Image: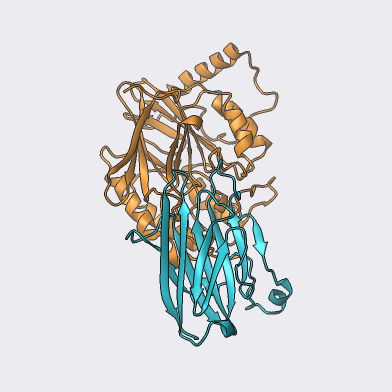
Chain colours: A orange, B cyan
Amino acid sequence: MFRLSFGVACAAAAAACGTQPPSTPPPPVDSALPLDAPARNGAGPGGGTLDAFEFAIVGDTRPVNLDDTAHYPTAIVQQIWMDVEAESPHPAFAISTGDYMFASVNGSEQGPQLDAYLGARASFDGVVYPALGNHECNGFTDSNCGPAGADLEPPNYQLFLSRMIQPIGETLPYYVERFAATDKSWTAKMVFVAANAWDGTQAQWLGEILSEPTTYTFVVRHEPTMSGTAPGVGPSDQIIIKHPYTMIIAGHTHTYEHVPAYKTLIVGNGGAPLTSDADYGYVVIARQADGTIAVTSKDYMTKAVVDSFSVNADGSPATP
Amino acid sequence: MLAGLAGCINASALEHDPDAMLIDGELDEPVWNTTAVRGVFAGDGGEAIARPYSEVRAFVRGDAVYVGLYAADEDIESTDRFELTVGTVAVSLSAAGSSSDARVRAGVDRDGTLDDPRDDDEEWVVEAALPVAALGAPPWALRASRCDTTHAGHRHCGSWSTVLTAR
């Protein structure tokens, strides 16, 4: 049923905006999946239908030093995912904001570090949609991976795809997950942008995906606007601002920070060395009965609320 | 592995000796993860782990003591620095790559922009080589410290100390 509703809505939006279908077929990003929310009850590959829209955010989780797998912050990461698992109500899904490793592209620590991360992440019994971080390219913030990228496809990138992307039914580091309410009261899309695997194909895809009307749109990208040396940050920002969106969810900076001016939430305090005053922790996002989106940041040890605020579907501050 | 590079590079030495240390701010020689002693800075206010996060690694090889200093930093400034004391040598090592003691070779690697508070930076790393001959008799007291001001305007200081033996 959602396939039909989304299709009609997309066509109507395109007509209203006077846009024409692209002259070339859309990139095969989700070609194996329907262009709407899967009629699955619960979150899974492609998204799903949900009774309640509530999810968790965790990131960044890499160790301090290159190839230092022995000091991967496993205990912190595991505690955070245990906290997420213990949340009530249980989050329908989680997203991670990138940087799961700090491994030399010429070394062999990528696999062991992903072992540590995925082992800790397994404390959460739910699907996790991951964003690509710069450390899943070659480590440099300005790196650009992928077949057309200057840094090609090092093991960090390949293992990210095979061990984190393919299990959720995707093939590329940029993808969309579509959700809809069981009672049809809302729709949402989670748009994952890979700023360290940026190319023209992703740019075209992003514009098309963001043109799909949904009640809520969350753009998940490792680097926030304030970390603009990543190849895809500026170009994707130029596309994003042309469309309605609820929030950009980022990491990269190892802290928790709400940046209202950019409608951005930074969740990078998942175990990587902390850059500011914030402690390690995670964020829970929950749709409220009035349609607003409540954001709650929590400390990983005490579960104390560090920060909380609400926004409307268009990202504007919600009036209490 | 970070963006930005300054300091001393002895590429020819590395080429001929796989165990040679490249003093470039990248702690990518395996010894940093295997042999070096490692300490996480505690906050001077009693915090078990200082904010922003800092750590030090150190080991002795041949005629030098090698020290690696990691600084998480959301706003890297050229005046940011570590204060390092090993034995009788006390030196300031800055995020800009400077060493206050000419006997101490140092390289810095930065992920972020220097002196631009408008954006979010990530970290900087100093890799330093101190000549054993300048340190006095072992064992050597090692102390590393750092203060930093976050975007929020909060100033934090932290440090870590140990004693290094010659082997």
Taking the spot 57% from the left edge, 50% from the top edge, the residue there is A134
**Could you tell me residue A139's position as x and y percent?**
58, 55
Q: Number of marks in the image?
A: 0
Taking the spot 32% from the left edge, 21% from the top edge, the residue there is A290
**Could you tell me residue A185's position as x and y percent?**
36, 20
Visible in this render: residue A27?
no
- Comparing A201 with B90, the one in front is B90
**Could you tell me residue B56's position as x and y percent?**
48, 68
Visible in this render: residue A274?
yes
Taking the spot 54% from the left edge, 13% from the top edge, the residue there is A12
* Residue A26 higher or lower than A281, as above or below: above
- Comparing A137 with A36, the one in front is A137
* Residue A90 higher or lower than A178, as above or below: below
User: In the orientation shown, which residue stands out farthest toward the right?
Assistant: B12
Q: On the rendered structure, is B29 left or right of B72?
A: right
**Could you tell me residue A193's position as x and y percent?**
55, 38
- Comparing A148 with A195, the one in front is A195
User: In the orientation shown, which residue stands out farthest toward the bottom?
Assistant: B137
Q: On the rendered structure, is B102 left or right of A98?
A: right
Q: On the rendered structure, is B93 left or right of A48?
A: right
Q: Quadrant of residue A174?
A: top right
* Residue B145 higher or lower than A31, as above or below: below
| Quadrant, the C terminus of chain A | top left
| Quadrant, the N terminus of chain A | top left
